[in-house]
Image (spheres, coloured by chain):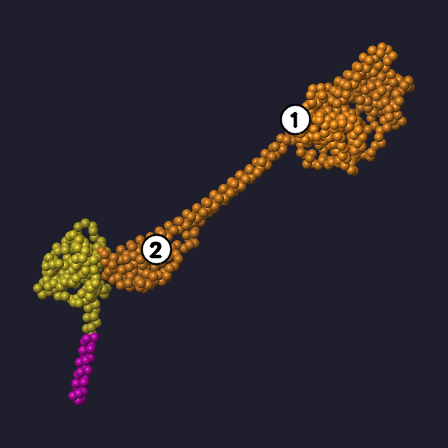
């Protein structure tokens, strides 16, 4: 065996190893990234099915979709909302490090950060007119993404929504994997 | 009369037909309107359905839940009217659908569909809170034409039947009117015939009455005349003044006798001796007489058709009738004019006979007497044959002329018609029955010379009325016969048996119990050689049939003069001799 032969074998092994490793992980990672993309696309889509409390905002006031904490979407979210509107309102994306009660967001994806976990973020926003969206962790927002039958779906906590002063369309509720109904009245779907 | 009715009928029919057409047209309009409504409704229904679907699928479409979308879409399969349903996302891609035929997979292609009849295509935007999420495409099948037509079958059938009913009813009504019209015509015809019959019966009734009176009166006249005759014969060389008185009395009696003759003629009771007569010759023979009678102002013209049949008629009576008619015509033409006497053959057919006239269909010889006189108004034309009806001033006429002619013609089995127009003239047509017999030799009734002197002959006189009987006895004695008298059939037969020398039986016809004819037959049975002469003024009895004397019977009409009686007896004795 020559040096070159050893190198060649090693190189081949490395390449093979790399290929195999990359190939094995790429499928799972691709799926994961696809789900993330879908979630990014879903975020703003909740808007038409939710009514926020208070007087109707100005027709051209921006509609803010916020990502609080570590942003899993990156540019995907920006692309997804590009050119989209809620009614006549342009959609903007805000990325925030921490949740605050008076932050200018209509929809907030709580990813959890270093200083604030998802649970803390939720606590911070409790009672605020913000549609909180979480990604299937221990602490769930009003909308909590879930994977069901290989598809991205969501659960809805209508009770919390009520506490936050939000009204969620029954159409959206009907699409949810599960719904935690609000206690008051019979407005459950 | 039927003209206006006819027009009315047509108008009615046209009206009904127009109504029927209008009804059908209205129904078609309603159907078209309903059809449009149906289309509009189905389009609206489709739009609503699409909108409902669009509202339902918002969330599923927004979050790309294709399974849920497909479920929503599939739910519409149950509606057989839905041909295809598609849901396109906000990028125009087909995300869920079902179809019974075809389906475009891009919204752009679906937006410009091939137009097909019987399809309704609607699009509904899927939007939530002003966010356009996609589009719902829905294609409805309209009901098949046959099924839609099926819906109109029942009302269409009703309309058709109604129209048909209208038409039939209208036709029925016009048929009914037609029948009614016919019926009315029949009623009118019947009334006319009844009127004719009534007239005929009236004439007959008057005839009976007149005849009855005339008969009795005639008998009495017979007595008067007979006795006057005897008076004149026996006292001719007596007082001339007495003789003149008797003459006057006789004259009056003769005029009375003429009157009764006319009454009898009217009542069809005068004895007639019809012969086979050449009417054309009779008429032409009368022309001179008529010219003299009518005067110079009236032209007399005779027209005779060739090949004229002979008529079976009593000629002297016919001549009297023609003279009567001519005199009527003369009176109608005081300023002169023209009298035309026309003769021709005529055939009166069944239709004519059935037209309410009292006439037997058959062959007739017609004599028409036409004048250019004043004419007779239509309202009195029907009465002219009634006795004593006259338009002439009092004293100018007896009113018996036409009735006498009428009676005579009817008795002869003929027929008479009168036509008149005021200011133009009058035509009287006499239809005389055609004679089937060979022409007879003109009866050479040359009066035998008045028998004079005694004869060795015995005559049996049978007469129930004493006056007449006595006159007859006297008259026969005057004529030189031996006379035996009997007042009835029984006595007569006894006398006949008792007196074999009786050679001639002179008997009245009308007698109580046994009439003259029966007596004569019985007498002939016992004495075949016995000659018989009847006396009668009245013919409603056995000696005549319809007033016509049996062939070979000898008859002397009452009232008679001694000369007439003598002549008849001579004839009877000479016959078969």
Residue A118 coordinates in the image, percent (x, y): 12, 62
Residue B518 falls in image quadrant:
top right
Q: Is residue B326 left or right of residue B448?
A: left
Q: Which residue is mark 1?
A: B380
From which residue to which does the magenta span run?
A1-23
In the visual, does B145 lie left or right of A54? Answer: right
Q: CA distance from mark 2 to mark 1?
A: 95 Å
**Chain A in the picture: what colour?**
yellow
Instruction: Pick whichever, B265 or B532, lies toward us.
Output: B265
Query: Magenta segment: does it hold A137?
Result: no
Q: Earlier in the sequence, mark 2 or mark 1?
A: 2
Q: Could you tell me which secondary element the residue under label 1 belongs to?
A: helix
Q: Quadrant of the N terminus of chain B?
A: top right
Mark 1 chain: B
Point 61% across, 34% down: residue: B186
Mark 2 — on which chain does it sit? B
Q: What residue occupies the far bottom of the structure in this picture?
A: A2
Q: Return the residue found at the far left.
A: A115
Give the quadrant of residue B448.
top right
Q: Position of residue B153 (x, y in %)?
A: 44, 49
**Screen quadrant of the C terminus of chain B:** top right
Q: Which chain is orange?
A: B
Identify the residue at horizontal 91%, vertical 18% (top origin). B453
Neighbor class of circle 2 (other Cα within 10 Å; few <14, some 14-19, many 20+) is few
The reply to whether label 2 and label 1 mark residues of one chain is: yes
Local crowd size for mark 1, using a 10 Å CA cut-off: few (<14), some (14–19), many (≥20): few
When the figure is inspected, residue A177 is found, relative to residue B324, above or below; the finding is below
Q: Answer with left or right where residue A88 lies relative to residue B365.
A: left
């Amino acid at each position: 065996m020559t040096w070159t032969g050893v190198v060649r074998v090693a190189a081949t092994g490395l390449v093979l190893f790399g290929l195999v490793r990359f190939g094995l992980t790429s499928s799972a990672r691709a799926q994961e990234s696809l789900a993330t993309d879908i979630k990014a696309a879903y975020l703003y889509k909740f808007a038409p099915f939710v009514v926020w409390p208070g007087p109707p905002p100005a027709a051209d006031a921006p509609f803010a979709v916020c990502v609080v904490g570590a942003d899993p979407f990156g540019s995907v979210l920006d692309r997804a909302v590009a050119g989209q509107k809620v009614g006549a309102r342009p959609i903007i994306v805000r990325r925030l490090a921490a949740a605050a009660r008076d932050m200018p967001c209509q929809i907030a994806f709580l990813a959890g950060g270093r200083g604030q976990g998802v649970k803390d973020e939720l606590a911070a926003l409790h009672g605020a007119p913000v549609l909180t969206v979480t990604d299937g962790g221990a602490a769930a927002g009003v909308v909590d993404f879930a994977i069901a039958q290989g598809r991205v779906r969501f659960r809805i906590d209508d009770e919390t929504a009520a506490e936050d002063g939000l009204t969620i369309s029954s159409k959206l509720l009907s699409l949810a994997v599960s719904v935690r109904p609000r206690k008051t009245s019979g407005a459950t779907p | 009369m039927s003209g206006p009715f006819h027009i009315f009928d047509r108008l009615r029919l046209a009206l009904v037909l127009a109504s029927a057409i209008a009804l059908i047209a209205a129904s078609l309009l309603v159907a078209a309107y309903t059809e449009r409504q149906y289309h509009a409704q189905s389009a609206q229904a489709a739009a609503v359905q699409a909108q409902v679907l669009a509202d339902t699928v918002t969330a599923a479409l927004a979050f790309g839940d294709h399974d849920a979308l497909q479920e929503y879409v599939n739910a519409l399969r149950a509606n057989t009217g839905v041909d295809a349903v598609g849901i396109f996302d906000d990028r125009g891609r087909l995300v869920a659908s079902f179809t019974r035929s075809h389906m475009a997979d891009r919204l752009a292609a679906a937006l410009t569909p091939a137009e097909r009849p019987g399809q309704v295509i609607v699009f509904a935007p899927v939007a939530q809170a002003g966010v356009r999420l996609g589009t719902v495409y829905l294609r409805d099948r309209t009901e098949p034409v046959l099924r839609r037509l099926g819906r109109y079958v029942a009302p269409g059938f009703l309309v058709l039947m109604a129209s048909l009913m209208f038409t039939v009813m209208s036709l029925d009504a016009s048929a009914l009117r037609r029948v009614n019209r016919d019926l009315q015509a029949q009623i009118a015809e019947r009334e006319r015939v009844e009127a004719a019959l009534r007239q005929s019966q009236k004439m007959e009734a008057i005839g009976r009455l007149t005849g009855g009176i005339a008969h009795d009166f005639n008998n009495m006249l017979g007595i008067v005349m007979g006795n006057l005759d005897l008076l004149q014969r026996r006292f001719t060389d007596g007082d001339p003044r007495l003789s003149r008185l008797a003459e006057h009395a006789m004259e009056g009696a003769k005029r009375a006798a003429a009157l009764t003759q006319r009454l009898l003629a009217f009542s069809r009771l005068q004895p007639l001796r019809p012969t086979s007569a050449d009417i054309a010759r009779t008429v032409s023979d009368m022309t001179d007489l008529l010219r003299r009678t009518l005067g110079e102002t009236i032209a007399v013209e005779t027209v005779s058709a060739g090949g004229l049949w002979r008529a079976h008629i009593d000629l002297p009576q016919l001549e009297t009738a023609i003279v009567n008619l001519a005199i009527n015509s003369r009176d109608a033409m005081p300023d002169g004019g023209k009298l035309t006497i026309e003769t021709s053959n005529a055939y009166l057919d069944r239709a004519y006979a059935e037209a309410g006239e009292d006439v037997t269909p058959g062959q007739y010889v017609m004599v028409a007497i036409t004048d250019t006189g004043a004419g007779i108004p239509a309202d009195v034309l029907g009465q002219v044959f009634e006795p004593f009806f006259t338009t002439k001033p009092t004293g100018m006429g007896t009113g018996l002329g036409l009735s006498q002619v009428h009676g005579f013609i009817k008795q002869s089995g003929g027929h008479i018609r009168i036509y008149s127009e005021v200011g133009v003239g009058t035509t009287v047509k006499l239809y005389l029955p055609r004679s089937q017999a060979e022409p007879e030799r003109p009866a050479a009734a040359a009066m035998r010379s008045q028998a004079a002197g005694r004869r060795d002959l015995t005559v049996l006189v049978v007469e129930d009325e004493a006056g007449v009987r006595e006159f007859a006895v006297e008259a026969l004695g005057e004529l030189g016969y031996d006379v035996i008298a009997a007042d009835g059939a029984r006595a007569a037969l006894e006398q006949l048996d008792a007196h074999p020398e009786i050679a001639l039986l002179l008997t009245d016809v009308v007698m109580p119990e046994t009439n003259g004819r029966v007596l004569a037959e019985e007498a002939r049975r016992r004495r075949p050689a016995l000659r018989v002469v009847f006396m009668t003024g009245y013919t409603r009895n056995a000696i005549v049939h319809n007033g016509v004397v049996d062939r070979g019977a000898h008859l002397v009409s009452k009232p008679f003069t001694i000369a007439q009686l003598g002549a008849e007896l001579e004839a009877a004795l000479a016959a078969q001799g």
